[in-house]
Image: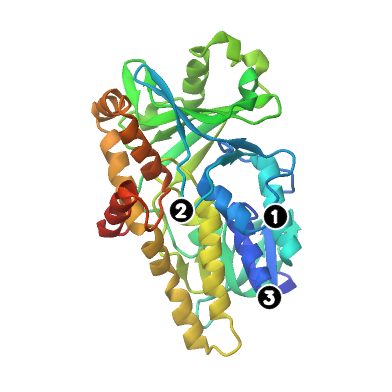
Amino acid sequence: MPTAIKADADVIVVGAGPAGSATAFYLARAGLDVLLLEKTTFPREKVCGDGLTPRAVKQLMNMGVDIDAPGWVRNKGLRVVGGGLRFELDWPQLESFPDFGLVRTRQDFDQIMAANAVKAGARLMEGVNVTGPVLDDRSGHVVGVTTKDGKAYRSRIVVAADGNSTRLALGMGLHKREDRPMGVAVRTYFTSPRHDDDYLETWLELWDDETLLPGYGWVFGVGDGTANVGLGLLNTSAQFKNIDYRDLLRRWCRSMPAEWGFTEENMTAPIRGAALPMAFNRQPHYTRGLVLVGDSGGAINPFNGEGIAYAMETGEIAAEVIERALRKDTTPAQRERTLRAYPQTLKDAYGGYFTLGRWFVEAIGKPGVMSFGTRHGLPHPRLMRFALKLLGNLTDRRGNASDKIINALSKVAPPA
């Protein structure tokens, strides 16, 4: 057993990425004592495209993050390249979301998010490597966490925001579901004139010799003289396990216009990769005192690989549930009943939409489907505007015809 109890809190949140920091922010704002544990020290690098859709921007605005401060780069929409075409799609005009996206490196972004949680009252401890849960001998419930240096921290509820490789969830026997798609992202940075682009740019044709792969490439201007350049690929193709992703990115960059400067000499960071757990690939999202948010529960959109927006949103939903569960007038039985409703709350919010995404990635993993869609879908602007809303999950509840179609499909699809 651990040597000592270092600190106590109402809630321990493990991991100070977007999911953990958002959860800690909302819990602290509700008046709860929150301990936010981060295994690294800020600033720290994280593999990501660094692009934020209007869905993510809305969450930042809700939390009072100053997105007008220096370092935030705004974009108007998505530039799509494929099928011999190149065109720009502005973010949709909606009541529910802003009409712009942002770019910010994760090195800055995560630190800003953690600082925002601290400002709301959370206690942040960096350099604390959590190794597993502390379980109550009688009930088997999580009552705290152990750390690499042999200490223990106890709380009434623990939130796993420790990412795809979540030690906490694994320590509770929650393993990945094999019937959910996985993605992989690889990216690097180049000094490039593309650094101040007004649009996020996606390339829909990724070729490995003669094979068109299910995924896309991106060029996102960071605004500091560099561009984030990367690839996102899905495991729904037969080639997935046999591809050297870093080499594929190098080859892809060599095919780009020379004036963009995507060369080894201009590379400012090594090529790094990360797994993308999609469509709720680890369930249930609550069990015996442990709440899963963000990547630990596979809250990544299968349509586009977006995780940051859903990390923050699941953090907010989890915080609302936990705050209700820990009210002074609740009995232990009522508290447990409230927490057990959390997985269904997530399924109600995202389950049908994520199922549509699963069907989509299964389809484009089949030979010929991706090629057909690129060749016949891209020339139709109205269809592409619909696709932008569908893939970005950007609709109003009472919007236009395309909003109603997407909302209806999400509602009738079985939950993920």
The residue at the point 71 percent across, 75 percent down is 8
What is the spatial separation of the Cα atoms under label 3 and label 1, in whole angstroms? 17 Å
Image spot of residue 133 (x, y percent): 58, 66
| Residue underneath mark 3 | 31
| Residue underneath mark 1 | 114
Q: Is residue 332 above or below residue 183?
A: below
What is the spatial separation of the Cα atoms under label 2 and label 3, in whole angstroms? 26 Å
Q: Amino acid at mark 1?
A: Ala
Give SS at disc 2: loop
> Where, by quadrant of the figure, is residue 33 drawn?
bottom right
Q: Are marks 2 and 1 in contact (CB under 8 Å)?
A: no
What is the spatial separation of the Cα atoms under label 2 and label 1, in whole angstroms? 20 Å
Q: Amino acid at mark 3?
A: Gly
Q: How is the image coloured?
A: rainbow
Residue 351 seen? yes
Q: Amino acid at mark 2?
A: Ala
